[in-house]
Image (tube, rainbow, N blue to C red):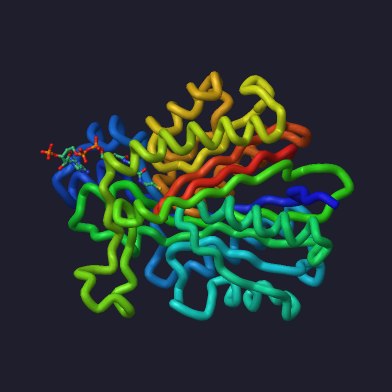
Amino acid sequence: MYSKIVGTGSYLPEKIVTNQDLEKMMDTTDEWITTRTGIKRRHVASETDTTANLATRAARRAMEAGNVQPEQIDMVIVATATSDDAFPSTASRVQHQLGLRHVVAFDVSAACAGFNHGLSIADQYIKTGFAKMILVIGCEMLTRAVDWTDRSTCVLFGDGAGAVLLGASETPGLLSTHLHCDGSQHHILYAPNTVVQKNADSPFVKMEGKEVFRHAVTRLGELVDETLSANNLTQTDIDWLIPHQANIRIIQAMAKKLNMSMEKVIVTLDDQGNTSAASIPLALDIAVRDGRVKRGDLVLLESFGGGLVWGSALIRY
Ligand code: COA
């Protein structure tokens, strides 16, 4: 048995904060943000939004797209670094909001690479026959987790959610997943849980940007090689690259590595900023709905985040 994506959905909050808006709030410029990152604007959740609500909206759209009924879903996996509660999981809220049966529901903590981790876990459950239909969601409210007086981090992030339904299939859809972690680099990108870590000065995202950038380009380059080689493929076989949307220069480096024109890379960064675990399912859903990614296309998803963690998934969509 194999797993295959049967439906995708996404949700972005209505409120948009542009680089020009940020110029009025802090010592920054549109020019600095655009040239260093590729970001032009980001969506920001309202006061009343919760991470679970964003996730549920994206999930409903994926269910509509795949024509999947609540009773068909056997498991909910939510990838998020910004869960509404320390416990229980965001997945348990989503399970209830969607009116699902009492099926397994849990969160995955793998920062910006969380969605690929969720896909990989879901794939194992489907291959073993434990589940036939799994909802995998990436959702974040990173704008609540950044210090809005720290211009080096707050300009980078946005809010949103993306969801896929992964179903059992006779033919291969998810071809392989590859996940890695280097815990020795924990300190270059993290957000302390100040309830538990009493000595931490703030709960906000802390990042050594240049170091993160350097590791991302190296590790993602290795990951692309690993994924192609595991599937006996070459760069030209890939139809679409859907990278985690953190920085346009990292994305361009991966396109170059794959010898791929930027037209074959799905980029949402300019409109959304870095939405962490949500960025890949958001980009996938947008590209499916606008007709770029079609059934049968070979799609490479790759992501990188705090941990450090990095992961890929190769999909015959
Ligand atoms: N506006 C204007 N200036 C800013 C700024 C902002 N928003 N943020 C930082 N600066 C300033 C710095 O204070 C520094 O000034 P100085 O030279 O006077 O000290 C200068 O810009 C350069 O800062 P630096 O951090 O060296 O910039 P950089 O070229 O490394 O770019 C990032 C910063 C964050 C854009 C870049 O390192 C990056 O994208 N890294 C990867 C981050 C990432 O992808 N994280 C998520 C992974 S999931």
Residue 193 shown left or right of residue 178 in the figure = left
Camera-side residue: 186 or 278? Answer: 186
x, y (%) of residue 180?
A: 52, 49
Q: Quadrant of ligand 1?
A: top left
Q: In this rendering, is residue 280 above or below 57?
A: above
Which residue appears at 56% of the width and 54% of the height?
115
User: Where is the C terminus found, in terms of image quarters?
Assistant: top right
Q: Is residue 13 visible?
A: no
Task: Quadrant for residue 203, please give it.
Answer: bottom left
Residue 282 to residue 75: above or below: above
Q: Percent from the top left, x then y, of residue 141?
A: 42, 61
- Residue at 53% of width from left, 69% of height from top? 52
Front residue of this view, candidates 162 and 61: 162
Q: Residue furthest right?
A: 170
Residue at x-position 33% and y-position 79%: 196
Which residue: 85% across, 50% down? 169
Residue 250 locus on image (x, y percent):
41, 33
102 over 302 or under it: above or below: below
* Image height of 82 relative to 158, above or below: below
Q: Is residue 102 left or right of residue 24?
A: right
**Is residue 188 among what the camera can see?**
yes
Report the number of discs. 0
Residue 175, horizontal then vertical, whole percent: 73, 41
